Amino acid sequence: MSVYTLNLELNVEIYQKHIIDKRMEILRKLYNSLLHELDKRYQRMLKVENFNIKKNKEILLEKYGISYQEIYDFALPIQKHFSKNINMEMMVTIVKKCLNQYKKSILCDRKKHYIKFGRFNCFEIKANCKSFVFKNMIVDWAGLKLSCKSPLNSYQSKALKSKICYYGIYRRKIRAKNKYYLRLILIGKPPLKDKFNINCYPKSPVGIDIGNQTIAISTLNLVKLEELCSNINLIDKQIKNRINKYNRQKIINNQNILNNNVKTVRFSWYKSKKMKKTKLELAELHRKYYDLRKQSHEKLANYIISLGDIFFIEDMNFREVYCNSIKKYKKNKVNSTIRKSNLTNRSPSLLVNILVKKLSYTNKKIYKVNPFKVKASQYNHLTNKFEKKSLSERWNYFGGYTIQRDLYSAFLLMNIKITNLDEINRDLCIKNFNNFKKMHDMEIKNLSTSGKKLNKNFGIH
């Protein structure tokens, strides 16, 4: 069952803002208190049943009160104390959420995370609940009536025809002010926007070679080499300047703490008005940074979908690459930190997830190829052999040709056999190579004469 979300902005008055913020804070404290109680019971279980945990873990969890009914009984007196703001249905959703999150952290050996002040920004509840009613563009949340902004655009009006399975109130800080949205989780596929027409797209295989900072695309009619999220470079510099500014203000306003060098005594940093202002500016820059990155990925995914009907991409584990860069940090601090920051800033895995999600709504197919079996960066279709290369080598030299490495691997991915995804179709490569070479030379010429500052991974000087 596929689902998608729709956010509708709410018209909120000042007294309504106070009520929403108060309810969010109560729900946050309830969540943290339940999490603390679950952790106490689990630690008690570890002390007594240290040797029997691996064999009968689920039975022991119920024995020591880590179950829905026990946590429900613990949360009931807390709910009665805040009965004016929180009803039973809201309490049940928080209990289920907390219990599921804690069980996941136990099974996967992860740390438990308490929600900090002001970080509980979204609350969701089932559509059949009496405490949350949405009718005629008006929300009734336990006595608090909120109206949605109108008029709606064509996409929103089409989406509201779908069946709603979850409601939610979503709070977001934009330009140092809180804005509130009604979040609807709808069943089905999202409606297509008016400007999109899937039937007019060409029928062609598309090879995609994605890296930490760049993406190479190859089709029968087009060859493209692009930098991921090229529009965030300016904001990245502004963020670094604001961080340095905040650190300087912190040192100037806390000279007495820094001069004493006292580590045993607890102290709190003094924050001036200018420090608070720069912190708000930094938060706003981070929000813009995230929004621009996601927007550029959405645009690029739409552009890639318009190029063909069958897509081939390497099944890269970016999480593993990120973890390996952290392990290498102790040995070589400079290179590993650069690679780690590129992954977090450009977020290639987000682009892959968006592309897979969008293609699931259409009749088009995407095939994920095993990079260790195909070895697209090492294969030479003229000699039918694999030649190892280092990452610093950005050009391939064979048969009198000079070809950019990423574009060539995208070309090879385009010509993979659908029946056997671990093998490249050499006959198709020989057939399409001359056309690819012409488009490749045109793309390299356009990039070199564009006058823009190019990414180092392109290998174009």
Image: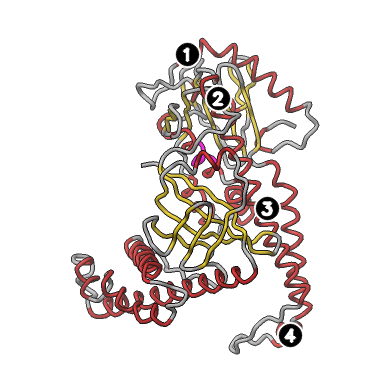
Q: Amino acid at mark 3?
A: Lys
Q: Which residue is mark 4?
A: 259
Mark 2, residue position? 197
Q: Is residue 248 above or below residue 426?
A: below
| Mark closer to the observer (1, 3) | 3
The N terminus lies in quadrant: top left
Magenta residues? Answer: 351-355
As displayed, is residue 409 above or below residue 211?
A: above
Amino acid at the residue labelled 2: Asn
Mark 2 in CB contact with mark 4 (< 8 angstroms): no
Q: Amino acid at mark 1?
A: Leu
**Residue 224 horizontal side relative to residue 281, left or right:** left
Q: Residue furthest right?
A: 451
Upstream in sequence: badge 1 or badge 3: 3
The residue singled out by tag 1 in the image is 428
Residue ID at (48%, 32%): 313
Residue 168, image x, y percentages: 48, 58
Q: Is residue 249 at all visible to an observer of this figure?
A: yes
- Residue bearing mark 3: 288
Q: Residues within 10 Å of mark 2 (few under 14, many from 20)?
A: few
- Which mark lies nearer to you, 2 or 1? 2
Image point 49% across, 28% down: which residue?
376
